[in-house]
Image: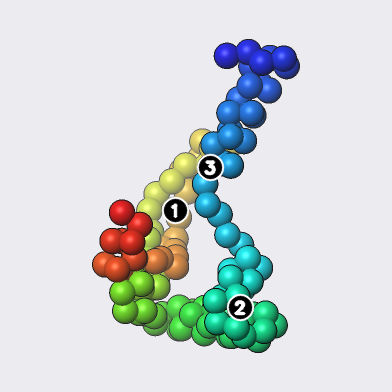
Amino acid sequence: MYISGGLYRAKIEVFAVYLKGEEQMNKKELVGKVAEKTGIMKRDVEIVTDAILEEIKETLAADGKVQLMGFGSFEVRSRAARNGKNPRTGEAIRMPEVKLPAFKAGKLLKDAVR
């Protein structure tokens, strides 16, 4: 598909149309919507949001788990140590075990998305 600038421009336009249809929300928009729904001032909602996110981060850093019934749970998962290859040199290297944050959606959230 060629549109007035060649194939590259057409791909960008198709990608832009694809993104336009998706619902995306950043932290500022989330704070605004919560403030609107609850009648609480935006700066107060932002303080609470920051505190919640900080507490989740601290709990995960201590290898804990945060469960929000119906919504989902945040936890730390480990990826085992493994052998790899340096793509630049082809040299075999040992990759250490890595801990990663993970989220598992709860039943109510899954049902709402379906």
Classify residue 15 by image quadrant: top right
Q: Residue 6: in sight, yes or no?
A: yes
Classify residue 80 by image quadrant: bottom left
Residue 49: where, in percent of width, then height?
Answer: 58, 80
Q: Which mark is residue 21?
A: 3
- For the image shown, how many numbered marks are present on the structure? 3
The span from disc 1 to disc 2 (Cα, nearest Å) is 49 Å
Q: Looking at the image, which residue is at 28% across and 61% down?
A: 111
| Residue 19, placed above or below residue 28 | above
Horizontal relation, residue 41 to residue 106: left or right: right
Q: Which residue is mark 2?
A: 35
Q: Which residue is mark 1?
A: 94
Q: Quadrant of the C terminus?
A: bottom left
Q: In terms of secondary structure, where does tag 1 sit? A: strand
Q: What amino acid type is highlighted by mark number 2?
A: Ala
Q: Which mark is residue 49?
A: none
Q: What amino acid type is highlighted by mark number 1?
A: Arg
